[in-house]
């Protein structure tokens, strides 16, 4: 009787484990764990919670969890070693900015006035890249694929076999073409969207504050930092000085004046709604 009970319990555990490894939940669903045409796969692919290449976007862990899978390859002949990072985003509200945030990595920093990368088409798939390679990114709905390799002298061949294999496994859903990405209208819209995103981030952090009052000073500073970026953009592209507003924000921070910072956020959101369709001073 005891033996039978142990067998039944073991079977139930196995069923639960198999059920937890449904489609989209295992490393093999996202990574190619075998070698790819001369590129030897690492034997230790990894996975973990986190937004992957978009960690600097500053919001992915606030209201949901994403999962990132990583693997590297190495070609003994060409000495090219691409590192692949595939992130399954949760499909939450914040995923509305995925395309915008992936493009961020290919814009001129710190000004971000212009798209500095290129939209390449490989086997019918459009991806973000650079003219000389080394970095490739694309979206497949709410999955972000990022591929990088080191080539300081820009003389190594691109790992096209790896890129093509991943595009076949996870096709790109990007529709933007290179001429559109480099157009003035697109650059203007990206800047306006970034200003909106910064204010949206402030709202996200205020929601976070409601559930964690112990971090009031640090969260208020994060919110103020995003507002300062918004003010920098507004000054550069709309000609409105942000000096007085920045001084006011510093005073509110010093006094831990949550209401004062909220009032500024409301003011900026109203301003943006009134001015979002106006032209900007793009150099």
Image (tube, rainbow, N blue to C red):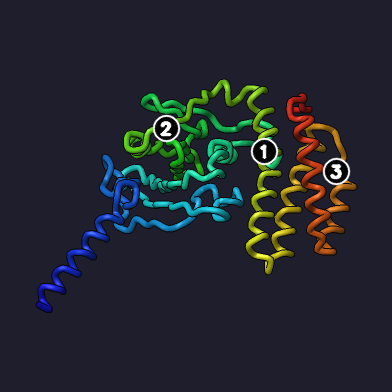
Q: Position of residue 95 (x, y in %)?
A: 53, 42
Q: Mark 3 — residue?
A: 242
The disc placed on residue 194 is: 1
Q: Name the quadrant of the C terminus.
A: top right
Q: Is residue 179 left or right of residue 75?
A: right
Q: Can residue 283 be seen? A: no
- Near mark 1 (Cα within 10 A), the count class, few <14, some 14-19 or many ≥20, is many
Q: Position of residue 141 (x, y in %)?
A: 44, 36
The residue located at (63%, 26%) in the rendering is: 186
- Near mark 2 (Cα within 10 A), the count class, few <14, some 14-19 or many ≥20, is many
Q: Is residue 130 left or right of residue 211?
A: left
In space, the residues marked 3 and 1 are separated at their CA atoms by 17 Å
* 131 or 79: nearer the viewer: 131
Q: Mark 2 — residue?
A: 172
Q: Is residue 43 left or right of residue 227?
A: left
The residue located at (37%, 57%) in the rendering is: 46
């Amino acid at each position: 009787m005891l033996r039978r009970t142990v067998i039944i319990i073991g079977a139930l555990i196995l069923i639960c484990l198999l059920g937890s490894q449904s489609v989209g939940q295992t490393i093999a669903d996202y990574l190619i764990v075998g070698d790819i045409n001369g590129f030897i796969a690492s034997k230790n692919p990894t996975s973990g919670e986190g937004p992957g290449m978009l960690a600097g976007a500053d919001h992915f862990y606030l209201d949901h969890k994403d999962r990132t899978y990583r693997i590297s390859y190495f070609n003994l002949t060409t000495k090219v070693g691409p590192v692949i990072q595939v992130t399954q985003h949760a499909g939450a509200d914040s995923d509305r900015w995925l395309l915008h945030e992936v493009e961020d990595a290919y814009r001129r920093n710190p000004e971000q006035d212009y798209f500095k990368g290129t939209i390449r088409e490989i086997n019918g798939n459009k991806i973000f890249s650079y003219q000389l390679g080394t970095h490739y990114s694309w979206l497949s709905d709410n999955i972000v694929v990022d591929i990088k390799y080191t080539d300081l002298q820009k003389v190594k061949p691109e790992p096209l076999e790896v890129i093509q294999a991943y595009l076949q496994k996870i096709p790109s859903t990007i529709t933007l073409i290179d001429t559109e990405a480099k157009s003035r209208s697109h650059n203007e819209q990206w800047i306006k969207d970034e200003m909106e995103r910064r204010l949206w981030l402030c709202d996200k952090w205020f929601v976070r504050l409601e559930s964690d009052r112990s971090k009031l000073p640090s969260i208020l500073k994060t919110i103020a930092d995003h507002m300062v970026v918004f003010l920098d953009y507004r000054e550069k592209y709309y000609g409105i000085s942000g000096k007085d507003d920045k001084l006011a924000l510093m005073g509110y921070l010093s006094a831990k004046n949550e209401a004062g910072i909220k009032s500024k956020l409301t003011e900026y959101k109203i301003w943006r709604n009134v001015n979002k369709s106006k032209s900007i001073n793009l150099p």
